[in-house]
Amino acid sequence: GENVEQHPSTLSVQEGDSAVIKCTYSDSASNYFPWYKQELGKRPQLIIDIRSNVGEKKDQRIAVTLNKTAKHFSLHITETQPEDSAVYFCAASKEEYGNKLVFGAGTILRVKS
Amino acid sequence: DSGVTQTPKHLITATGQRVTLRCSPRSGDLSVYWYQQSLDQGLQFLIQYYNGEERAKGNILERFSAQQFPDLHSELNLSSLELGDSALYFCASSVGRQADQPQHFGDGTRLSIL
């Protein structure tokens, strides 16, 4: 089945700097790649997603890029703020698995002010 | 607020017991998913229902079962509970059954087994 690897496991950046989190997936048939932000004790919150027919998507300070050939996708956060501190999860899904999301292990992002 | 409602928020019980977790999806959503989040296993897919029927199954234990009712709410039943079942259980919902539809999560039920 699908396997999603996420790096790094922890990331510390200075406020205002950029943060990049990378994920690789194993199944080339996966076609949907969402990113979730989870604050301590709260629910995963969808922040951006990308479908396999698109190479890049942007929403204000957040962007996601997808390289289908290399089977990896990345989350880019620019001008980081303390409130960006959270755990970020990437995920992948494809039709054959129903809609189940296979999650990466998560990245703890700390933004230092 | 995601629009997905889960009850109860917290559940404390003992080994060997049985509990039921409830989820109401967002208005208009036909798919409901259950996920388990633990420190050692991360976020794991358990099961998906679409419009009352089971659509996909993940690593769900035989002691666990779920169903989706005609009003689209779903229940996850956990029986013969073990210490290792302590975790956060999330429900998510999406509009349809396609793999590329966004899933929105509820606030979860924190299950503690003593």
Image: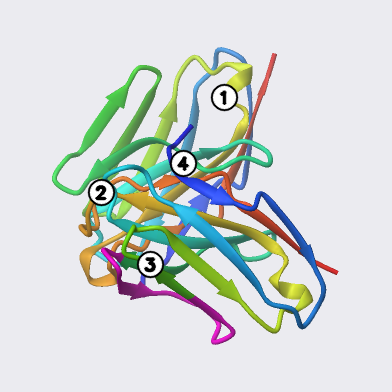
Give the label, 4 or 2, closer to the camera: 2
Q: Are marks 4 and 3 in contact (CB under 8 Å)?
A: no
* Residue B15 visible in this rendered orientation of the protein: yes
Give the label, 2 or 1, closer to the camera: 2
Magenta residues span B50-65
Q: Amino acid at mark 1?
A: Asp
Q: Position of residue A45 (x, y in %)?
A: 48, 38
The answer to which of B44 and A2 lies nearer the viewer is B44
**Mark 3 Cα-neighbour bin, 10 Å: few <14, some 14–19, many ≥20:** many
Residue at (78% x, 74% y) in the render: B83
Residue corresponding to mark 4: A36
Magenta segment includes B35: no
* Residue A104 visible in this rendered orientation of the protein: no
> As drawn, is A53 to the left or to the right of B105?
left
Label 4 to label 2, Cα distance in Å? Answer: 18 Å
- Element class at badge 4: strand
Chain of the residue under the numbered disc 2 shown in the image = B
Residue corresponding to mark 2: B95
Label 4 to label 3, Cα distance in Å? Answer: 25 Å
Residue corresponding to mark 3: B68
Label 1 to label 4, Cα distance in Å? Answer: 12 Å
Q: Are marks 1 and 3 in contact (CB under 8 Å)?
A: no
Q: Quadrant of residue B110?
A: bottom right
